[in-house]
Amino acid sequence: MKKKKILIEEQMLSFSRRALLIGGLQIGALGLIVKHLYGIQVSDSQKYLSLSDSNRFNFSLIPSSRGSIFDRKGRILATNTGSFDIEIVPEWSQDIQETLYNLTKYVSIDEDEIKTILNIAKKQKSFIPITVKSNIDRQTVSRIAVNVPYLPGVSIERNERRIFPQGSLAVHVTGYVGRVSKSEQNKNSPELFLPGFRIGKSGIELQYDVDMRGLPGTKRVEVNSLGKVIRSSIEKDTIKGKNINLSLDIHLQTFALRRLQAGNDKLISVNEPKAKKVLDQNKLFAWQLRDDRDHINQNQKGDYVLPESGSVVVMDVNTGEVVVSVSAPTYDPNKFDPGISTSDWQMLSNHPRNPLINKTISGQYPPGSTFKMMVGLAALETGVITSKTKSFCPGYIEIGDMKFHCWHKHGHGSVDLQNAIAQSCDVFFYEIALKTGINNIARISREFGLGFPTGINLPGEKSGLIPDRKWKLDIKKQVWRPGETIIAGIGQGYVLATPIQLALMSARIANGGRKIKPTLLKTPILQTANLNSIKVSKENLNIIKKAMEKVSLDEFGTGRNFRLGIKGVEMAGKTGTVQVRRISTKERESEEGVIKNEDRIWEWRDHALYVGYAPMDKPRYAISVIVEHGGSGSSKAGPIARDIMEATLNDDPTRFIPSNPINKPLI
């Protein structure tokens, strides 16, 4: 009996412990539930309320339509076209990774793309769509649209894509657009956070990016628990971006680009058997040729070569409007939206002739003999010479133990300033540069637009370089030497200029010294009443203009062989040939003489330059041409300038109207 009682007590004790343990577990579980419910109902109530509201309603931005770019005659250079993009809102997807994998059944998405999207989803703000694929075809759109109910958070959006109908013809002016990088995002511009939003990256697209964006609108979106959009409504309309009307003429631009690229070569169709064979065998050559050409160059030796590279600028001498702005080689801006491939970008970046650089405003070249007008004008203004001053050129000049050569081996004999410019005598300018001094030459040069940015409305403009004594002391920590003045006297040494600066210099000479400023925007009315004038003698400036006329009209002028083919119309100008390598005494005195440009490798050939204006008696347009490593200015750059100026004048119905009176609009 006693044993039975003990057993019953032990069983009751064991039951009490189990009951206590179970009770404790129940109380603990209940506590956790209460704590969780408290967190949901009290501590995190605002968070879940916000999520709940956002899961049902959301306000999102609507990107505005980007403004278009037109040429001076209203032809489209850049505009928008519709495209379909796949987007996903992470918060509307129950499992974004699973949704993306399901999406791969209908559109190609690789593992790297999925990882990128997942990383973006972790870092970005809530309820912002992420672009999964851009510019998808209609067949893919149809497949996904049917399956959207099984792809929570996924939607197909009709967005805009930037297109450039003229392709590469004006790319260095228009520029291109691209996706917004993290460093470019700005809290004051919320549209920059939108998926696939594009902004200007270069050229006019960058210069006027904010104006061209317009203002975004807003829409209210309602979704169900599966993340499917039930309905949406516009809360605020977008405001379209501003259109930009350029001074550029795309027809002249096209002609100028093709004429520059052709140089003096024969153009062969890429479909010719021999040309096709060359392109098939030499893939690097074919790639460097680029994909926008239907002809390739064949030089006088019969070799297939790359098109000429360089720059052409045509500017209205009265308004500063730039009618032609060519930089070669070019590239296709259409490849940058939705996004250029890594391989294409590397190819562009590594191209030996630098297609990504706008050489018109960023290419800095020694101006060579085109600088002689500035040296001559400085000498006239300082009284060092008069129009009748003569100097004898034996083909060289000796200063101390150094010998400086003229391009004409046997010299020009006795020449005055006008003949020295017409025949491009180097010795004459060696001597007057020494007498005038580098500071006086620099002062006059800067008045005509050299040595600092012109202020043209494009980003990335370089300043060129007009050196003086202070510059060398500040930058080089050395005193200026006479030999450096001599070399500067023919536009070499430290002297550098951009093609736009050389065109501006020519325009200011042509218009009598009025300080026009270059612009790429079309100006409806000529506004020159308040323009400042350069403080130089009109008589001296006319001497320089007469000298530029003799370049074409004189029997020994370096431009006599490429006069305009328009009856009664002539072009004043100046040729230039710039050495890019030092010619040794041994080479000069050898039996063969100086190696001809065509026998050198491309990188060692001289640059060919020409500047000028026309018509000669009633100037309307100024032009500058630089052919990189093109050889002689008179044989390469001059003929290009002639053909482009003829095309410009033939396209201009006002070409024979007298120079525009200051306060009257153009006809």
Image (cartoon, rainbow, N blue to C red):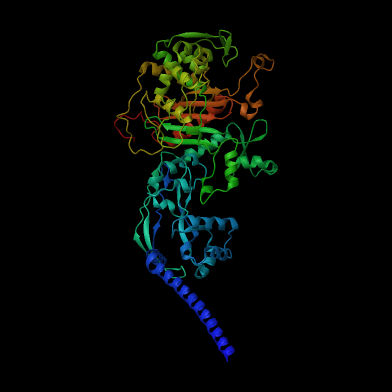
Residue at the location (48% across, 11% down)? 434
Question: Which quarter of the figure has residue 30?
Answer: bottom left
Q: Residue furthest bottom?
A: 1
Instruction: Please tell me which residue is depicted at 41% across the width and 52% down the height of the picture.
Output: 191
Q: Is residue 617 visible?
A: no
Instruction: Name the spot of residue 112 as percent of width and height, x first.
Output: 59, 55
Q: Quadrant of residue 43?
A: bottom left
Q: Is residue 539 visible?
A: yes
431 and 45: which is toward the camera: 45
Q: Is residue 127 left or right of residue 484?
A: left
User: Which residue is nearer to you in this view: 619 or 227?
Assistant: 227
Q: Quadrant of the C terminus?
A: top left
Image quadrant where one finds the N terminus: bottom right
* Residue at the spot 56% in from the left edge and 14% down from the top edge: 406
Query: Looking at the image, how many numbered discs can be counted on the residues?
Result: 0
> Up-down: is 448 above or below 345?
above
- In the rendered image, residue 11, in percent from the top left (x then y), is placed at 55, 85
Please provide percent x and percent y for residue 55: 42, 66
Query: Going 64% across and 17% down the picture, which residue do you hit?
Result: 584
- The foreground one among 485 and 567 is 485
Please say if 659 is above or below 408.
below
Name of the residue lying farthest toward the front: 2
* Residue 622 percent across, percent down from the top left: 44, 29
